[in-house]
Amino acid sequence: MRLIIGLLDVVFNLFNILLLVYVVMSWVNPVQSKWTGIIRSIVEPILTPVRRFLQKNVPNLMGTFDWSPVAVWLLISLIRQILSPLRYL
């Protein structure tokens, strides 16, 4: 069980880093390259359903700012908190 939780923790850490890079990329609008495409292909499948959910259920929140990365970070944090006690079983 520790191994699975440890692997999930590594995956969550890597995804958080990629999400941060993706958010920064959206601000600076870099030249399209292989790396920006890879990051987009990893992050967007997670952000798109969250974005749709937020637009449907909290329409006043969705102004000019995309809150989906913040929501995903919060969801990952929540999942980590739930899984944390399982690490010691």
Image: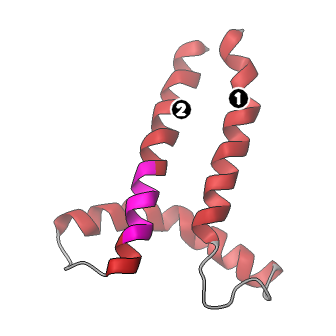
The amino acid beneath tag 1 is Leu
User: Can you say which quadrant of the picture contains the N terminus?
Assistant: top right
The colouring scheme, among rainbow, by chain, secondary structure or one colour, is secondary structure
Crowd tier of the residue under label 2, counting other residues whose Cα lies within 10 Å: few below 14, some 14–19, many 20 or above: some
Q: Tell whether label 1 touches label 2 (CB within 8 Å).
A: yes
The residue under the point 48% across, 40% down is 13
Taking the magenta stretch, the answer to whether it contains residue 25 is: no
Could you tell me which secondary element the residue under label 2 belongs to? helix
Residue 65: which quarter of the image? bottom right
Query: Residue 39 in the image: x percent, y percent?
Result: 33, 61
Does 15 sit above or below residue 59? Answer: above
Residue sitting at x 58%, y 14%: 2
Image height of 42 relative to 27, above or below: above
Q: How much space separates mark 2 and mark 1, taking CA atoms?
A: 9 Å
Q: Quadrant of residue 20?
A: bottom left
Labelled disc at residue 24: none
Q: Quadrant of residue 52?
A: bottom right
In the rendered image, residue 40, in percent from the top left (x then y), is placed at 36, 67
Q: Nearer the viewer, residue 45 or 68?
A: 68
Residue 5 place in picture, x, y as percent: 58, 24
Q: What is the number of the mark on residue 8?
A: 2
Q: Which mark is residue 83?
A: 1
**From which residue to which does the magenta span run?**
17-24
Q: Nearer the viewer, residue 59 or 21?
A: 21
Q: Residue 74: x percent and y percent?
A: 68, 53
SS majority, magenta: helix
Say left or right for 76 vs 55.
left
Taking the image as shown, residue 33 lies to the left or right of residue 40, namely left
